[in-house]
Image (cartoon, rainbow, N blue to C red):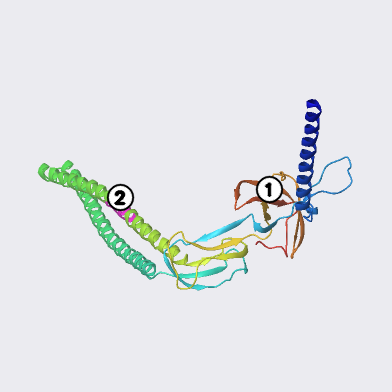
Amino acid sequence: MDIKRRKRKWKMTSIVIFAVSFISVAILYIMDWGKALPEFKRENFWIGKVRRGDFKIQIYASGILVSEKYEWITSTNDGIIENIIVRTGDRVTRGTPMIVMKNNELEQSEEDARLQLLMAQDEFTIKQKNLELDKLQREADLVSVKMAYQQAKYDANNTNLLAQEGLISLVDLERAKAKEQEYRNKLETEEKRFEKFEEIISAQKRANQSKIKQLDGVWQLRKRQLESLNVRASMDGIVHQIDVEIGQRVSIGNYLAKISKTDFLKAELNIPESKAKEIRLGQDVHIESAMGRATGAVCRIDPAVKQGTVLVDVCFKKRLTEPFLPE
């Protein structure tokens, strides 16, 4: 009897456990009833027929066209912007006036350099005239000494002939020879002095010319600096950017404007970081914009990530012409 009671008790316990488990599952099922099934967005999946070959991925990104060839025009002097002749988007050629600057100190220094050059030129002219007069005087003195020597030589010869015939004393002969020797020495001295004087004239002329050349160089420099206040285009292209305004004071080296070539363009695309790993050099790129369509290839991938994007450069297989413009 005791064994039968134990079996009956175990059977009742099993029934109770099963009932509790069933009720728990039922409660959980009722609690989840009515909840929506998991949803998946279609754009997160690639749907299509499986075929043997390369798996092509299309990545869309925004970007801008930029010029590969451009030049920044900088200020070569301090000054104040007096006038801006061109505007952003204007086409210019090399030498086209763009910006006019003003610098009163530079204008004054240019005028001072010009006047100093004129004064030096006048002084040089006066010195040259005085040296020419001195030279003429020395030439006249030299001619006089030559004539005196010729006369002394002639007298000495005549005295020698008379002395040979006994018509004149030996004392007079020696006196005539001494006079001839005196004028000969004097002539040699004057000739040497005249040669030295000519060397002095040449040296002074070179010194004066060097001084004038130096002052002329200073004046030419001031003129170029003054002319540089009229800023001109350094190449053919389009005015891409103007960084100054009328009345602004600028210093040497400040950026004034940017000129870009319109036929050397590339595209800069901002690729999301999550998709940048799929980009490879040489991959084809199709550009679509309001200006038209173009085809190129990836030519550079920036290794840095900025604000969640990677900068990718696209070089075009053919040069882009109008209506394509930078930025």
- Side of 221 relative to 290 (left or right): left
CB under 8 Å between discs 2 and 1: no
Q: Nearer the viewer, residue 153 or 253?
A: 253
Eyeballing the image, is 144 above or below 125?
Answer: above
Eyeballing the image, is 43 above or below 130?
Answer: above
Question: Is 163 one of the magenta-colored residues?
Answer: no
- Magenta residues span 197-205
Residue under the point 10% across and 43% down: 171
Residue flagged by tag 2: what amino acid is it? Glu
Magenta span main SS: helix
Q: Quadrant of the N terminus?
A: top right
Residue flagged by tag 1: what amino acid is it? Ser
Eyeballing the image, is 4 above or below 327?
Answer: above
Q: Quadrant of residue 289?
A: bottom right
Could you say where residue 295 lies in the image, as x and y percent from the top left?
77, 54
- Side of 64 relative to 209 (left or right): right
Which label belongs to residue 199? 2
